[in-house]
Image (cartoon, helix red, strand yellow):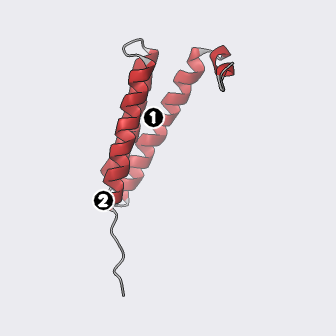
Amino acid sequence: MPLGGFLDTMPTWLFIVAHIIFLIVGIWAAKQAMENKLSYASAFWLYAVTQLGFLAFFAGWITLKMAVLFEQTLIVIMIIWIITKIKQPPTP
């Protein structure tokens, strides 16, 4: 059995609930970042959107490989966005 194979025994609704919680956390983080006027605040919305890809998989609209590719692409964009927007402290 491949690592994580035991997850196949879990009910699908458990994963749906987990991704809904991840979506809520993503929305909360994005709102907190925006309220704190972080220069990269909008990037946090990408994390929330990644969860829609997984929910689309559970709805039967896309494959798991497509959901993972969608998620990883948005996460890479988010990382690049944050890194390029971080204000560097002035050097003495």
Q: Which tag is nearer the camera, tag 1 or tag 2?
A: 2
Position above or below: 91 against 79: below
Q: Residue at x 32, y 56 (%)?
A: 40
User: Which residue occupies the foreground of this view, 16 or 63?
Assistant: 63
Q: Position of residue 45 (x, y in %)?
A: 35, 43
Give the quarter of the image for residue 92: bottom left
Going by the picture, which residue comes out furthest to the bottom? 92
Q: How many marks?
A: 2
Q: Is residue 28 above or below residue 51?
A: below
Residue 15 point in image, percent of width and height:
56, 23
Q: Is residue 81 visible to us here?
A: yes
Tell me if 20 is positioned left or right of 71 in this view.
right
**Amino acid type for the residue under numbered disc 2:** Thr
Say which residue label 1 marks.
23
> At 34% across and 71% down in the image, what residue appears?
88
Q: Secondary structure at mark 2?
A: helix
Residue 39 in view here:
no
Q: What is the number of the mark on residue 66?
A: none
Question: Eyeballing the image, is 26 above or below 38?
Answer: above
Tell me: 6 left or right of 45. right
The residue furthest front is 2
Q: Dot 1, how many residues are within 10 Å of its Cα: few (below 14), some (14-19), or many (20+)?
A: many
State the separation of the CA atoms marked 1 and 2.
24 Å
Q: Which is more toward the observer, 28 or 19?
A: 19
Compared to residue 27, the image places residue 61 above or below, namely above
Q: Residue at x 65, y 22 (%)?
A: 2
Residue closest to the far top: 60
Q: Is residue 39 left or right of residue 28?
A: left
Q: Position of residue 42 (x, y in %)?
A: 31, 49
Which residue position holds label 2?
84
